[in-house]
């Protein structure tokens, strides 16, 4: 469910898992591969870093010097010496992949409707590509909190694999540990690094960082399937091997109703209703991603209500966001300061003001009148 929930969103995590799978396929082939595979993997590694920086944990795969292959039920890991010349060929394709970052200042310079950071300045560019906004969340949990999270996340890892999948993964990891120990240590080490970072990441949705573990589990499952096939073939039960192919089909049949969201239009309906409730030329303050993303889609994707100035409350704290909004709606005051309540005060008598989800401070400072799915802001004593 976690994987599917990210695959149907415009988010980075499903694409991140794809880069992990491609790099694994290019660096851990079953037969000795051409050196060009590793250069392609280096290019994808640089390109993938432009999507999500946590791909850095898979850098050891680029230096892997073994080539596992399946031979009669045994996993043979053939060591291949990577000379210095082989390694010196990797930086060039790596830099070519990292060149995706050059698009950021070019795109920001065109003043797009939606903007994240200000990549047109060196400081803004570094703030964006280094993930400076998220550094405080890295290892932001205590050890007891991480242990409690690990306990609650076990089902998130086990649920998509199912019990047959877990058995196959355990079988494959055992076979790797006995016949290709270095490869087993490599994959387990990478998995542990990813898991530790995810467990310590102080956000409510940090579980999505576990998606690459499902890719690694698929590698272990593949080794388990090959081992099981060898056992069945040796025991003259090869006719039953086709049943293994039915496992993914059975899972798809069983889970399709739970993941099919083709008829779920709740976000679209909410955004259209919210924009319809806003008065002409209103200031609409959206609180949270769920509200803001739906409203941005309706306004900028569907072209609804361009007269409404939509402000995401948390982003208003950043000066680059305030400058960007003033370019789009010049009557908004960038000098109002990072407090969204000051923005509301500055728009008194200028624009009707609505908010999606007011907090307690707003309820004490202003009078809030429910209007459809929104709340209209008024001042105490005003008519």
Image (cartoon, rainbow, N blue to C red):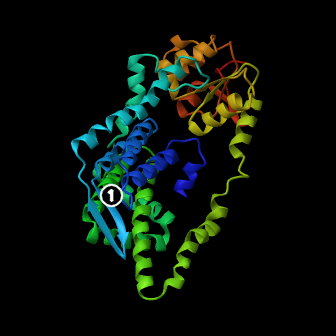
Q: Is residue 50 above or below residue 305?
A: below
Residue 7 in the figure: left or right of residue 93: right
Residue 239 against residue 337 in the figure, above or below: below
For disc 1, the neighbor class at 10 Å (few under 14, some 14 to 19, many from 20) is many
- Point out residue 77 in the picture as x, y percentages from the top left corner: 29, 64
Please identify the quadrant where the N terminus is shown.
Answer: bottom right
| Residue 60 visible in this rendered orientation of the protein | yes
**Residue sitting farthest toward the bottom:** 236
Task: Identify the residue at image location x=37%, y=56%.
Answer: 28
Asked if residue 370 shows in the view, the reply is: no
Horizontal placement of 365 versus 33: left or right?
A: right
Q: Which residue is mark 1?
A: 187
Q: Quadrant of residue 259?
A: bottom right
User: How far across and down, in percent of the image, does residue 309 sit?
Assistant: 66, 21
SS for callout 1: helix
| Nearer to us in this view, 380 or 226 | 226
**What residue is drawn where x is 57% and y is 52%?**
5
The C terminus: image quadrant: top right
Residue at 37% over, 39% down: 137
Instruction: Please name whichever residue, 24 or 188, is drawn nearer the observer in this view of the structure.
Output: 24
| Residue 339 vertical placement versus 20 (above, below) | above
Percent of width and height locating residue 354: 67, 27
Q: Name the residue nearer the viewer: 152 or 223.
A: 223
Residue displayed at 37% across by 51% down: 34
1 w.r.t. 88: above or below: below
Displayed quadrant of residue 255: bottom right
Give the percent coordinates (x, y) of residue 181.
25, 65
- Which image quadrant is residue 74 in? bottom left
Left or right? Give the position of 138 relative to 366. left
Count of residue discs: 1
């Amino acid at each position: 469910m976690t994987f599917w929930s990210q695959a149907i969103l415009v988010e980075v995590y499903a694409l991140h898992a794809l880069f992990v799978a491609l790099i694994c396929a290019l660096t851990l082939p079953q037969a000795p591969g051409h050196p060009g595979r590793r250069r392609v993997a280096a290019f994808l590694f640089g390109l993938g870093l432009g999507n999500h920086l946590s791909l850095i944990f898979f850098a050891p795969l680029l230096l892997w010097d073994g080539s596992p292959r399946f031979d009669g039920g045994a996993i043979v890991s053939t060591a291949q010496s990577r000379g210095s010349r082989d390694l010196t060929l990797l930086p060039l394709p790596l830099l070519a992949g990292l060149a995706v970052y050059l698009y950021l200042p070019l795109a920001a310079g065109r003043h797009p409707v939606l903007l994240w950071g200000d990549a047109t300045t060196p400081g803004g560019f570094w703030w964006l590509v280094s993930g400076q906004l998220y550094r405080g969340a890295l290892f932001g949990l205590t050890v007891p909190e991480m242990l409690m999270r690990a306990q609650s996340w076990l089902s998130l890892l086990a649920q998509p694999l199912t019990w047959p999948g877990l058995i196959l993964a355990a079988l494959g990891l055992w076979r790797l540990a006995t016949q290709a120990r270095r490869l087993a240590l490599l994959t387990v080490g990478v998995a542990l690094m990813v898991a530790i970072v995810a467990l310590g990441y102080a956000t409510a949705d940090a579980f999505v960082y576990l998606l690459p573990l499902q890719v690694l589990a698929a590698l272990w499952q593949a080794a388990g399937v090959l081992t099981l096939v060898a056992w069945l073939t040796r025991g003259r039960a090869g006719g039953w091997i086709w049943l293994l192919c039915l496992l993914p089909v059975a899972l798809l049949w069983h889970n399709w109703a739970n993941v099919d969201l083709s008829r779920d239009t709740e976000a679209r309906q909410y955004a259209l209703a919210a924009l319809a409730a806003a008065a002409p030329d209103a200031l609409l303050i959206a609180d949270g991603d769920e509200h803001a993303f739906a409203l941005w889609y309706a306004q900028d994707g569907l072209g609804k209500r361009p007269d409404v100035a939509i402000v995401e409350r948390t982003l208003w704290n950043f000066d680059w966001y305030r400058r960007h909004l003033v370019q789009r709606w010049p009557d908004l005051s960038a000098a109002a300061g990072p407090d969204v309540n000051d923005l509301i005060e500055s728009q008194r008598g200028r624009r009707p003001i609505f908010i999606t989800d007011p907090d307690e401070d707003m309820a004490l400072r202003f009078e809030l009148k429910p209007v459809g799915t929104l709340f209209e802001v008024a001042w105490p004593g005003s008519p």
